[in-house]
Amino acid sequence: FKNTQKDGVSLQILKKKRSNQVNFLNRKNDYNLIKNKNPSSSLKSTFDDIKKIISKQLSVEEDKIQMNSNFTKDLGADSLDLVELIMALEEKFNVTISDQDALKINTVQDAIDYIEKNNKQ
């Protein structure tokens, strides 16, 4: 580095500071990339767990269960099945699902979103 003075501060020091800031930002971006991988793996894990529960509760093959599957229209659940499904989700994921919230959980994606938002594990 050329050691020139500018307003009483060495350009070498400024360049070193800037270099450290860039390195810090790169490390922060790397951390965010790693951190952002976790939600997708967590989401897949949640989806897999929910598929197992749905398959067991509704006697449906797991490969027929998609994110956009509607419990009643696509998977053949009746009102009692839905109550049992909600109870199984509460137990597996250690969440409490209010009656109002349960009425909003109509698809597998709805269940995943609720679990991801409210999971206490």
Image (tube, rainbow, N blue to C red):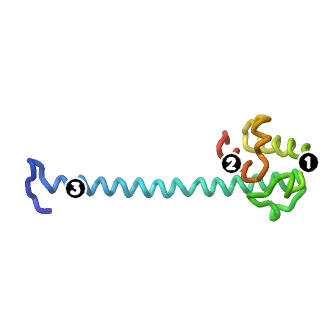
Sequence-first disc among 3 and 1 = 3
* SS class, disc 2: helix
Residue labelled with disc 3: 16
**Left or right: 37, with 10 as reference point:** right
* Disc number lying in front (3 or 2): 2
First reached walking from the N terminus: tag 2 or tag 1: 1
Residue where numbered disc 1 is placed: 78
Real-space Cα distance between discs 2 and 1? 22 Å
Name the residue: 31% across, 57% down: 22
Q: Quadrant of the C terminus?
A: top right
Is disc 1 surrounded by few (<14), some (14 to 19) or many (20+) residues within 10 Å? few
Where is 121 relative to 72, above or below?
above
**Element at label 1:** loop
Q: Which residue is mark 2?
A: 113
Residue at (80, 41) in percent of width and height: 103
Q: Does the residue at mark 3 contact the one at mark 1 (Cβ under 8 Å)?
A: no
